Image (cartoon, rainbow, N blue to C red):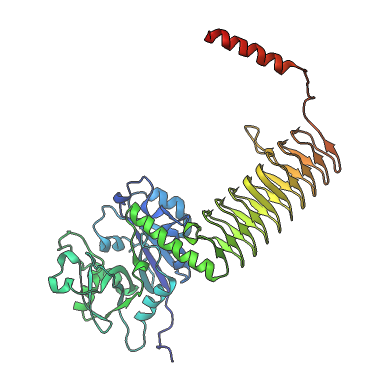
């Protein structure tokens, strides 16, 4: 099947609308910075947009501008919409930022974060089909419940009219093709069209979709592209909608993980981050939470009730149950971190083990070393963090405290209950604990005296 002929690709600019007040979130955090899978929703959108390599990205902001500036830095040009007089008015504020730009403009919404790159491309490409070009392309969808969405009145892919729900007739409201708000526009005519939009409507606002009607009245051609998945254009305006979006994302990611060769014992209980990477034959037991920055190699097992973030987990590693891996953790092939173990900014060499009840912070553990139960690396002196180095095949006895900075040599043994504050040489045994004091019969005499005292009080 031959492809539909298209014109050569033109430069692309993106306008991302993020000026809404987000009052339904009831939050001091800007609405579009609320995370989904550990990533601000606007970053999900910008990641998809980057696949189209836009020459310019302009974000329209209102309240919370400082938060967006801190998040986006130099990756986008921010322009302010004040007051907020509608979506058409918002795009109009980008005129100076897009001065001199000659190409296509994609208009997106920061609170509609999961528009796929292929959908964006389809909108752009639809404008440039040879022999059937369009000045504007609108992205539409057909939800189960059309609610109060604006309607796209079309015929064979060509738009006849656009209407907001509040201004629609009953016949127009019966149309099931809804406007997502997203569109692609030829940049040459965008601001000329916006200048002709009026606010003679129920809300008294300047609606962006009205440029479609303006273009049609002037004899322009406008087309519609329909996404088959209404969830792709679902907006997020409340905590409930945020949770629903999180749920949809997690459901899709779990399915992907299993399709790619991971075993999820109870998929609905596993929570992934946006960048979690899993190898083949990874097994994940119930109630595991992945924060950002986790890579799990082939054959690793994550037992139940673990929380993992910022960690590199090597081939065949076993983690948990009830383990916490924090940022900077690196577990080499065959290492084992058992129940109630916390690891932070630490490297465990091949085959090293910390089976239970241990804290390893700012540490390097050599291959084959064994860390006994109750061991802690005392890495913080109240002002600075210090590092502990444990050599290959070293054995750290249970309930030991390694007071950093300190090094334990290869094949060394630290006796159980030791508090080690000086380096231990390779092959050395280090015992650091007080001599045991034995007082024969002392406990019997104590109990007798206390029982007598208690009897006298009760009598």
Question: What count of labels does the image hold?
Answer: 0
User: Residue at coordinates 37% horizontally, 74% vertically from top-left?
Assistant: 104
- Residue 85 lies in quadrant: bottom left
User: Residue at coordinates 73% horizontally, 48% vertically from top-left?
Assistant: 365
For this orientation, the residue located farthest to the front is: 459
Q: Is residue 321 left or right of residue 140?
A: right
- The picture places residue 335, in percent across and down from the top left corner, at 70, 54
Q: Is residue 184 left or right of residue 361?
A: left
- Residue 242 lies in quadrant: bottom left
User: Residue at coordinates 78% horizontally, 24% vertically from top-left?
Assistant: 436
- The picture places residue 426, in percent across and down from the top left corner, at 85, 43
For this orientation, the residue located farthest to the right is: 427
Camera-nearest residue between 212 and 457: 457
Camera-nearest residue between 107 and 225: 225
Q: Is residue 145 above or below residue 302?
A: below
- The picture places residue 376, in percent across and down from the top left corner, at 68, 38
Does residue 420 show up? no
Q: Quadrant of the N terminus?
A: bottom left
- The picture places residue 402, in percent across and down from the top left corner, at 72, 37
- Residue 201 lies in quadrant: bottom left
Q: Is residue 358 above or below residue 321?
A: above
Does residue 450 show up? yes
User: Residue at coordinates 71% horizontally, 17% vertically from top-left?
Assistant: 444
């Amino acid at each position: 099947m031959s492809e539909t002929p298209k014109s050569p690709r033109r430069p692309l600019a993106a306008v991302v609308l993020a000026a809404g007040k987000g009052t339904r979130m009831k939050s001091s955090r800007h609405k579009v910075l609320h995370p989904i899978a550990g990533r601000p929703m606007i970053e999900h959108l910008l990641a998809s947009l980057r696949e189209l390599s836009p020459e310019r990205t302009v974000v329209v902001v209102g309240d919370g501008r400082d938060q967006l500036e801190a998040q986006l830095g130099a990756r986008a040009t921010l322009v302010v919409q004040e007051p907020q007089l509608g979506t058409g008015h918002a795009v109009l504020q980008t005129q100076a930022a897009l001065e001199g730009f000659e190409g296509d403009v994609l208009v997106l919404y920061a609170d509609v974060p999961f528009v796929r790159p292929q959908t964006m491309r389809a909108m752009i490409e639809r404008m440039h089909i040879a022999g059937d070009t369009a000045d504007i392309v609108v992205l539409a969808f057909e939800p189960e419940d059309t609610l109060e969405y604006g309607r796209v009145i079309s015929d064979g892919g060509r738009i006849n009219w656009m209407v907001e729900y509040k201004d629609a007739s009953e016949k127009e409201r019966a149309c099931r093709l809804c406007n997502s708000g997203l569109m692609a526009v030829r940049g040459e005519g965008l601001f000329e069209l916006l200048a002709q939009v009026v606010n003679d409507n129920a809300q008294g606002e300047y609606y962006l979709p009205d440029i479609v009607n303006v273009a049609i009245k002037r004899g322009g051609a406008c087309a519609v592209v329909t996404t088959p998945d209404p969830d792709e254009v679902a907006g997020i305006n409340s905590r409930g909608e945020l949770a629903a979006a999180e749920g949809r994302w997690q459901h899709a990611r779990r399915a992907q993980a299993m399709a790619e060769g991971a075993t999820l014992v109870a998929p609905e209980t596993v929570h992934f981050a946006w960048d979690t990477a899993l190898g083949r034959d990874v097994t994940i037991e119930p109630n595991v939470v992945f924060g950002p920055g986790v890579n799990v190699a082939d054959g690793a097992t994550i037992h139940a009730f673990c929380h993992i973030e910022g960690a590199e987990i090597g081939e065949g590693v076993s983690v948990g149950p009830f383990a916490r891996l924090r940022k900077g953790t690196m577990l080499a092939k065959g290492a084992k971190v058992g129940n109630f173990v916390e690891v932070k900014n630490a490297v465990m060499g091949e085959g090293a083990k910390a089976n239970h009840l241990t804290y390893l912070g700012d540490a390097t553990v050599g291959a084959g070393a064994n860390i006994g139960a109750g061991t802690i690396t005392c890495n913080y002196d109240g002002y600075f963090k210090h590092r502990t180095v444990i050599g290959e095949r070293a054995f750290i006895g249970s309930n030991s405290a390694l007071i950093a900075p300190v090094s334990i040599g290869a094949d060394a043994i630290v006796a159980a209950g030791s508090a080690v504050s000086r380096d231990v040489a390779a092959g050395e045994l280090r015992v650091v604990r007080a001599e045991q004091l034995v007082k024969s019969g002392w406990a019997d005499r104590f109990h007798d005296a206390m029982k007598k005292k208690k009897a006298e009080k009760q009598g």
